[in-house]
Image (spheres, rainbow, N blue to C red):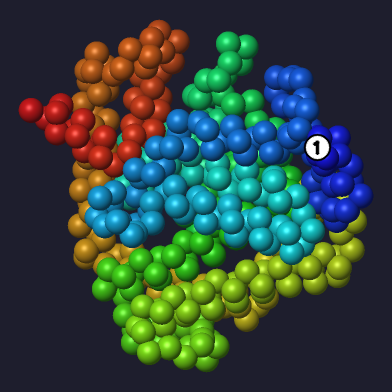
Amino acid sequence: MIIKRDDLEGQELELLAPYAVKSAESKGRAFSEKEDAYRTCFQRDRDRVIHCKAFRRLNGKTQVFISGYGDHYRSRLTHSMEVAQFGRDIARMLNLNQDLAEAIGLAHDLGHTPFGHAGQDAMNEVMETYGSRFEHNEQSFRVVHELERKSDEYKGLNLSFEVLDGLLKHRTRYDRPEAFDHLMPSLEAQVVNIADEIAYQSHDIDDGLRSGILTSEGLMELDIWKYAAANKVPSNVPEIQKHQMVTSIMSLLVNDLASNTNKRLQKMEVGSVSDVYAHDGQIAQFSDEVSRMAVQLKDYLYENFYNAKEVMKYNEEGKRVISNLFRALHEKPENLPDKYQSRLENEERYMVVKDYIAGMTDTFAMDLFSKLSK
C-alpha cells in the first residue's frame, strides 16, 4: 500500500490535536505550486531545507568551539539536528504537527554567521554603522525567502507561511527578531523555541565537560545537576556517568515542557490554532520549578563556559575576522564572487557583503581573510 499526501492530510485532520497546525489548512506559499503526490507541504519544506546549500554549510560553523577545534564538539549542523529531534519528540507528545516542528528546527540557524554568537555580535556592530542590524533568525528568513535559488519562477525556497512565521518569531536568550505582526507563532514554533534552549543547554554541558572547561564538581552547585545525580544509573565509567547526567537533564526538560504545556492548554481551554495565534504570550513553557533550574543553568554556562578564556580567545578572533573581512570586501567589492557583484546595481553594498559573509563557514572566512590581508 502506498501512502499518498491526501491520506496523510486526512490522518492529521482526524488524529492531531485541535490546536495543532494541519497541513491541509496551511496558509500556503508566496508562490503557488502544484502539490506533491506523496508529501505534505511541511514535509516538502523539511526536504527543501535539508537539500539547500546553507544547510550543508552549517557543518563548518561554530556552535561554541570553532570549527576544527575537535572531532566530537557540536557544530551548527549537529545543533540544528538536535533541535529538530527535540522539536519532533515534544510535538509528538503534545499531538502536534511533527513535520512542521522538524522543518522549523532544521531551518532556524540557516542564517547564522561563522563563529557563533560572537560572529553575530560582530556582524550586528558592523551593520549598526549603516543604520541597520543583524539578527540571525531574520537572516535565516532571508536565506530561505531570498538568497537560496531553486527555481526560475521565484526566489528562495518558497516555504510555507507557518515555517517562515516560525523562523521570524524564533526567540531565545540570544535571539530577538522583529516579527512582522503582533500574533504569537504556532504551538509547533513555540515548542521549537524551547527545544533550541534544551539542545544548547544540554550539549553545551557535554561539550564543556569534554573540553575540561566545566567539571562535575563545579556543576554540583546547580539544582538541575543535583537532580540528575540523584536520578542517574550507577556506573564506574566516568564518560558513561557524564552521559547519563546529561541524558537525565534532557529528559527532565523535555518531559516537563510537554507536561506543563499540556496543563496550560487545558487550563486556558485552547481549542484551535487561532486561539494559539491570538493568545497573549507563549503557551509552551516549563513549570516554575524547572524554569528556575533552567535559568540557573543558563547563567552558570554563560559565566563559566561561554565567557571562559579558552572560548573567549576564539570568540575575539572570530569577531576580528568578521569585522576586518567586512571592511576589506566593502572597500574592494571586486573581490566578491560574480553572483554577488551582479547584485550591487540593485542593492546596497553593505547588504550584499553582509549576505556573503553570513553564509561563510569558519574556515572559509579565515582563509579568505588571510588571503585578502596579504
- On the picture, is 213 further left or further right than 170? left
Q: Residue at x 38, y 22 (%)?
A: 352
**Compared to 12, does 52 lie above or below?**
above
Q: Residue at coordinates 47% horizontally, 68% vertically from top-left?
A: 202
What crowding class fits label 1: few (fewer than 14 Cα within 10 Å), some (14-19), or many (20 or more)?
few
User: Residue 321 in the image: x percent, y percent?
Assistant: 22, 40
Residue 336 x %, y %: 28, 18
Q: Residue at x 27, y 30 (%)?
A: 326
Q: Nearer the viewer, residue 114 or 122?
A: 114
Is residue 20 shown above or below 123? below
Q: Is residue 143 visible?
A: yes
Res. 266 image quadrant:
bottom right
Count of numbered circles on the image: 1
Residue 43: give x, y in percent of width and height: 69, 38
Closest to the observer, 316 or 68: 68
The percent position of residue 341, horizontal first and vertical second, equals 34, 13
Q: Is residue 162 above or below residue 349?
A: below
On the question of residue 281 being in view, the answer is no
Q: Which residue is mark 1?
A: 2
Which residue occupies 26% across, 73% down? Answer: 212
Quadrant position of the C terminus in the picture: top left
- The image quadrant where one finds the N terminus is top right
| Amino acid carrying mark 1 in the image | Ile
* Residue nearer the viewer, 63 or 173: 63
Q: Viewed as shown, does residue 165 lie left or right of 74?
A: right
* Residue in front for this viewpoint, 150 or 168: 150
The image quadrant that residue 46 belongs to is top right
- Looking at the image, which residue sits at the far left? 374
